[in-house]
């Protein structure tokens, strides 16, 4: 299995949780651009993985919007689109 390494630089100030979601979404965008399917996700972000799996609840409206973006993207990929 071949892997890719990349870096992302953001030009805005953000709290850690926002930065984690922005980096995760940037990675999903890269996967889409490179068409590297099937997708297997490994992350050390307990926030993103826990919210996605329903272990943690997204209480903050901003975090809920990020979670919904991730859910939409991954459900679209599950359906083969």
Image (cartoon, rainbow, N blue to C red):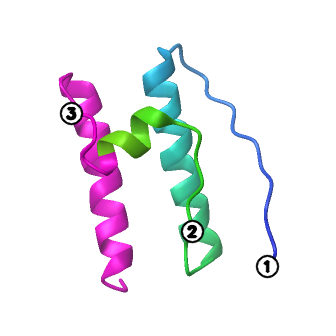
Residue receiving disc 3: 57
Examine the image and state in which quarter residue 7 appears.
top right
Say if the magenta span includes residue 23: no
Query: Dot 1 lies on which element?
Result: loop
Residue furthest bottom as drawn: 80
Q: Nearer the viewer, residue 32 or 4?
A: 4
Q: Quadrant of the N terminus?
A: bottom right
- Disc tally is 3
Q: Which residues are magenta?
A: 52-81
Where residue 51 sits in the image (x, y, percent)?
31, 41
Examine the image and state in which quarter residue 18 appears.
top left
**2, above or below 9, in the image:** below
- Left or right for 79, reference 20: left
Residue at position x 29%, y 56% in the image: 71
Residue receiving disc 2: 40
- Left or right for 14, reference 62: right
- Mark 1 or mark 2, earlier in chain: 1
- Mark 3 or mark 2, earlier in chain: 2
Q: Residues within 10 Å of mark 3 (few under 14, many from 20)?
A: some
Query: Dot 2 lies on which element?
Result: loop
Kindly identify which numbered label has been placed on residue 1: 1
The reply to whether discs 1 and 3 touch (Cβ–Cβ < 8 Å) is no
Mark-to-mark CA distance, 1 and 2: 11 Å
The reply to whether discs 1 and 2 touch (Cβ–Cβ < 8 Å) is no
- Mark 1 or mark 3, earlier in chain: 1
Residue at position x 31%, y 51% in the image: 53
């Amino acid at each position: 299995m071949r892997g890719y390494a990349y870096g992302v630089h953001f030009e805005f100030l953000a709290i850690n949780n926002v930065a984690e979601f922005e980096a995760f979404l940037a990675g999903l965008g890269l996967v889409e651009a490179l068409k590297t399917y099937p997708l297997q996700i490994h992350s050390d972000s307990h926030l993103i993985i826990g919210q996605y799996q329903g272990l943690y609840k997204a209480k903050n409206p901003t975090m809920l919007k990020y979670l919904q973006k991730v859910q939409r993207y991954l459900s679209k990929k599950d359906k083969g689109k």
